[in-house]
Image (cartoon, rainbow, N blue to C red):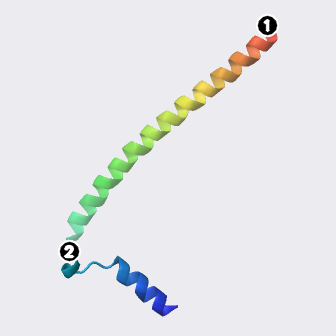
């Protein structure tokens, strides 16, 4: 089990010799700012998806109501 874990970790590590970038450590303030920025972007995307789902639900409910009314009229 530990051999498989070591192999998996080696795959995800990037060495400078292999062309991978080694990131410098960032301060807590920079990390917090980056995290906050990502969170705000995610909130915007979630709001957009929520709007689309609400619109889709509205269309489906409208279609169902229309079908019920048409069957009642016939």
Instruction: Identify the residue at image location x=19%, y=79%.
Output: 16
51 relative to 68 in the view: left or right: left
Label 2 environment density (alpha carbons within 10 Å; few <14, some 14–19, many ≥20) = few
Q: Disc number at residue 19? A: 2
Figure quadrant of residue 12: bottom left
Please give the residue where the numbered disc 1 appears in the rendered image. 73
Considering only vertical position in the picture, is 53 above or below 1? above
Considering only vertical position in the picture, is 32 above or below 6? above
The answer to which of marks 1 and 2 sits earlier in the sequence is: 2
60, 14: nearer the viewer: 14
30 relative to 66 in the view: left or right: left
Question: Which image quarter holds the C terminus?
Answer: top right
Figure quadrant of residue 31: bottom left
Q: Disc 1 vs disc 2: Cβ atoms closer than 8 Å?
A: no
- Residue 51 image position (x, y, % from top left): 48, 34
- Residue 5 image position (x, y, % from top left): 46, 86
Considering only vertical position in the picture, is 6 above or below 73? below
Considering every residue shown, the one lying at the far front of the view is 18
46 relative to 31 in the view: left or right: right
């Amino acid at each position: 089990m530990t051999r498989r874990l070591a192999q998996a970790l080696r795959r995800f590590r990037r060495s400078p010799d292999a062309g991978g970038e080694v990131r410098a450590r960032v301060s807590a303030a920079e990390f917090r700012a980056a995290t906050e920025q990502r969170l705000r972007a995610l909130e915007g995307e979630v709001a957009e998806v929520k709007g689309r789902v609400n619109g889709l639900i509205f269309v489906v409910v409208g279609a169902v109501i229309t079908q019920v009314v048409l069957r009642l009229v016939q």
